[in-house]
Image (tube, rainbow, N blue to C red):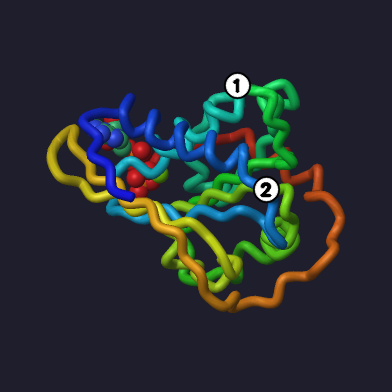
Amino acid sequence: MKFQSKGVRQTKNIASNLAKKVIKNSLQQHAQAFALEGELGAGKTTFVKGFAGAFGIKSRITSPTFVLLKGYRLPRVASQRGKQVTGYRFLYHIDAYRLKNYHDLIPLGIKEIMADPRNIVLIEWSDRVKKILPSKYIKVHIDHIGIKTRKITINNIYGPPSLKLRKGTSSPKEEMLALRSSGGAKK
Ligand SMILES: Nc1ncnc2c1ncn2[C@@H]1O[C@H](COP(=O)(O)OP(=O)(O)OP(=O)(O)O)[C@@H](O)[C@H]1O
Ligand SMILES: [Mg+2]
């Protein structure tokens, strides 16, 4: 699917519509991952803000450039919007800009997060950490066309997982949620 966005609000709406589809979808064997691609300032974080908004996440989404990963508990009320109850429980936002590969994400519990079908994981600069993507994920590519214009391409990708995800792991670690504070300045 291809979309043209003429401003921040449109990008957020496109993301929010995608999130609403995800809310309705049945869960898979692993986390629902989104690989966000596009140059600096393309609108990846803006997209995550719109996406999270559809799930009723009230806390301000800021870029996890320095903390790498932020976790947000999905509010129950939002899960039941439109009488459609979602099984998703947590949304994780990762910014891999400063990473050379996935190794720095292992101590943060990325394997367990990806193995749990109750998680939604959005990854900025995902090409730097390709190996942590599960077998099925959704690619969101944002092209910078003009000052306010963006082309947003959303693809479903199927492929073999590169890392073995542990089956049947318990719920995501609560301590991950502590990472949501301290946004820090942009690079
Ligand atoms: N149509 C649009 N969609 C998204 N952002 C837009 C749009 N038009 C202008 N902008 C501006 O582009 C910038 C996008 O910033 P954002 O932080 O979302 O990008 P990013 O891809 O996450 O960058 P980074 O790689 O640094 O993390 C914001 O300043 C926003 O106001
Ligand atoms: Mg960003």
Can you give x and y, in whole percent of width and height, for residue 24 in the image?
A: 62, 38
Q: Secondary structure at mark 1?
A: loop
Residue furthest front in the image: 83
Q: Residues within 10 Å of mark 1 (few under 14, many from 20)?
A: few
Q: Is the distance from the Cβ of mark 1 to the nearest ligand 1 atom less than 8 Å?
A: no
Find disc 2 in the rendering and name its residue.
26
Residue sitting at 72 percent across and 71 percent down? 165
Residue sitting at 61 percent across and 53 percent down? 32
Q: Secondary structure at mark 2?
A: loop
Front position among marks 1 and 2:
2
Q: Earlier in the sequence, mark 1 or mark 2?
A: 2
Q: Is residue 155 left or right of residue 96?
A: left
Find disc 1 in the rendering and name its residue.
58
Viewer-closest of 119 and 124: 119
Gap between marks 1 and 2, in whole Å? Answer: 24 Å
**In this rendering, does residue 128 appear at all?**
yes
Q: Amino acid at mark 1?
A: Lys
**In this rendering, does residue 97 appear at all?**
no
Q: Amino acid at mark 2?
A: Ser
Can you give x and y, in whole percent of width and height, for residue 10 in the image?
A: 31, 28
Viewer-closest of 101 and 81: 81
Q: Is residue 3 left or right of residue 23?
A: left
Can you give x and y, in whole percent of width and height, for residue 47 in the image?
A: 41, 38
